[in-house]
Image (cartoon, rainbow, N blue to C red):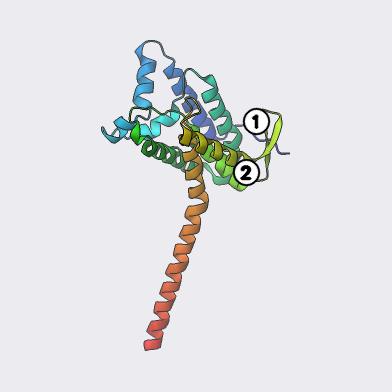
Amino acid sequence: MYTIGAPRLPPCVKGLIIANVSVFILQWFPGAIGDLVTYFGALYPVNTFIHFELWRIVTYMFLHSRDMIFHILFNMLSLWWFGVELEDIWGKRKFLIFYFVCGIGSGLFTLFYLLANLNAPVIGASGAVLGLLTAYAIYYPQRQVLIFGIFPMKMRTLVIGYAAISVFFSLTGGGGNVAHIVHLGGIAVAYIYLKVAPAAWMEWNKRVYLWRSRRQIDKMTKK
């Protein structure tokens, strides 16, 4: 069994954790300050679609529920556990691009899902974090983690389970205040980014190469 979460913090993971915790502290400021931080940073579909407040697609990733300390705790621990090795593999630039692609992509995914409820706010780094979990499962599908520190589970099974739960609650509307559609969006964007898009790009290059080869042969034949 492999124990994830090395006792160190590479630059990007460290910076993201500091940024999230700092914003969370701002959310707890007394008076109107904390409320304003949450309001102007949350992903409100009506503000994003109608008022074109596009910054919300990014800022919502750094906000967390003030009523559930577990919300930010889970996200930051997962960012640490799974992000350290991925940053080592990819380097800082690719890691940050992937993190924000998953976070922004899951935000857009959620916006279209909430077209029928434009006033529902969304906050949290869960989309980006679930993207990291998915990437980790793609690289290390057989690696095991301990659920609740007790039950061993393979990474591939863990992510498939997350996806299944997210689909179920997104369709049924259950799951309390947890934005399961954000989780699903993060998983979907990560899979497309790492598996579908590269395969499609390779197929496109192959077709272009064959087309150019045929044209070259036709030109030589005509001569």
Image position, residue 106 (x, y; %)? 44, 39
Distance from the alpha carbon under mark 2 to that under mark 1: 24 Å
- 100 to the left or right of 48: right
Q: Quadrant of residue 104?
A: top left
Considering the numbered disc 2 on the image, is that residue within a helix, a strand or a loop? helix
Image position, residue 122 (x, y; %)? 41, 29
**Outermost residue, front direction?**
172
Compare marks 2 and 1 and give the one earlier in the sequence.
1
**Outermost residue, right direction?**
1
Q: Quadrant of residue 49?
A: top left
Label at residue 156: 2
Q: Is residue 139 above or below residue 62?
A: below
- 147 to the left or right of 167: right
Residue found at x 69% / y 39%: 144
Query: Can I make out residue 130 in this image?
Result: yes
Label at residue 170: none
Amino acid type indicated by mark 1: Pro
Residue found at x 52% / y 40%: 131
Amino acid type indicated by mark 2: Arg
Residue tagged 1 = 7
Foreground: 65 or 164?
Answer: 164
Foreground: 223 or 178?
Answer: 178
